[in-house]
């Protein structure tokens, strides 16, 4: 109600103008007092990119897209493609370590700011599966394609088949075959997967996750990376999260979804990541000494968090014009 109308109404109902005036002054004082004690709202940080492990070139690529006005979706796709083409990485895309039969199979998923999702699982012979996942999201009524069907779909969209098993990865596989331990040994120092989250100039959040999965896995094994809520989850109203490490443990706790929901309840990204790791390690009888899980997260304001079970997990963060690799805090400090 406008001040003038309020005064007229007050006069018409028998209140004296002095009393009304006094009331108005009192209200102004209260409002003024409230303004002094209200905590300022955090200004959103844009653009921003965060990604698992030491992936400076991937993050730089994504950041440049954002700085040029591109979308968060384009940024995470192109950033992940950098690692998919990095043969030396041996954990994502071409050059990834194979399953126990010698086949490199790739998994990936992508989510945009509208909650759309696309994924491919167990794909052979196609390097840029993150882009195939985006095609699934945008060009089909489905959210997930697997194995031969995903490969055929990729070829129909113009992706070229190629041998993903490099000489270096084949050599490692042949060395592994000498003993061929049935239970894979988790490399907690630098384990698989790039998960990436970005906020663009419009404040929209998107995420992507791509991997060659657990080295020497059983044929057909799929981890958390391409599964919505496991390896990746984005809610544009709240934030996003991504995982790396032993996918089976991430899936059992639906880790990335859990982190976003904890942020919805008011936890910071750091607090949410720590709680999600706690859901894994604090289960009765859980022996977490031989596997690693790490999480990254970002909220709508551009606050970030990261946490892992063991030491050695790091992440790259582009924020306020700087691209840094940062060591994550971790649970197992004994």
Image (spheres, rainbow, N blue to C red):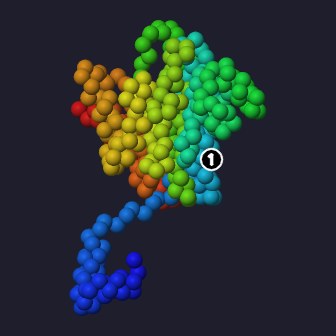
Find numbered disc 1 in the image and state the secondary structure of the residue it sits on.
helix
17 vs 54, left or right, is left
Q: Quadrant of the C terminus?
A: top left
103 vs 244, left or right, is right
Q: Position of residue 216 (x, y in %)?
A: 51, 17
* Residue at the far front in the pictured view: 13
Residue at the spot of label 1: 74
Q: Residue at x 52, y 49 (%)?
A: 205
- Total marks shown come to 1
- Whether residue 73 is visible to the viewer of this picture, yes or no, is yes
Nearest the viewer among 249 and 329 is 249
Q: Position of residue 42 (x, y in %)?
A: 39, 62
Compared to residue 59, the image places residue 292 above or below, namely above
Nearest the viewer among 91 and 305 is 305
Q: Position of residue 178 (x, y in %)?
A: 50, 8
Compared to residue 199, the image places residue 120 above or below, namely above
- Whether residue 330 is visible to the viewer of this picture, yes or no, is no
């Amino acid at each position: 109600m406008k001040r003038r109308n309020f005064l007229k109404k007050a006069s018409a109902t028998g209140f004296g103008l002095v009393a009304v005036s006094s009331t108005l002054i009192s209200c102004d004082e209260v409002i003024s007092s409230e303004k002094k004690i209200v905590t300022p709202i955090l200004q959103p940080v844009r653009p921003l990119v965060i990604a698992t492990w030491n992936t400076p070139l991937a993050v730089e690529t994504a950041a440049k897209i954002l700085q040029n006005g591109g979308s968060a979706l384009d940024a995470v796709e192109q950033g992940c493609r950098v690692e998919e083409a990095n043969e030396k990485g041996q954990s994502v895309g071409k050059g990834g370590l194979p399953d126990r039969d010698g086949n490199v199979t790739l998994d990936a998923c992508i989510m945009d700011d509208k909650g759309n999702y696309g994924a491919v699982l167990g794909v052979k012979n196609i390097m840029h599966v993150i882009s195939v996942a985006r095609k699934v999201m945008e060009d089909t009524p489905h959210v997930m394609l697997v194995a031969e069907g995903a490969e055929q779909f990729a070829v129909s969209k113009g992706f070229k088949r190629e041998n993903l098993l490099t000489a270096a990865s084949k050599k490692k596989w042949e060395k592994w075959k000498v003993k061929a331990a049935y239970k894979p040994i988790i490399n907690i120092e630098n384990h698989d997967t790039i998960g990436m989250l970005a906020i663009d100039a419009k404040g929209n959040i998107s995420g992507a996750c791509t991997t060659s999965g657990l080295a020497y896995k059983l044929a057909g094994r799929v981890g958390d990376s391409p599964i919505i809520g496991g390896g990746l989850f984005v809610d544009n109203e709240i934030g996003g999260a991504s995982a790396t490490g032993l996918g089976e443990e991430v899936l059992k706790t639906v880790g990335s979804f859990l982190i976003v929901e904890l942020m919805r309840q008011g936890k910071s990204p750091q607090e949410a990541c720590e709680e999600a790791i706690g859901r894994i390690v604090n289960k009765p009888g859980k022996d977490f000494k031989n596997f690693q899980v790490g999480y990254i997260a970002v909220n709508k304001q551009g606050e970030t968090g990261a946490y892992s079970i063991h030491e050695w997990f790091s992440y790259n963060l582009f924020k306020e014009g700087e691209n840094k690799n940062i060591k994550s805090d971790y649970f197992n400090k004994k």
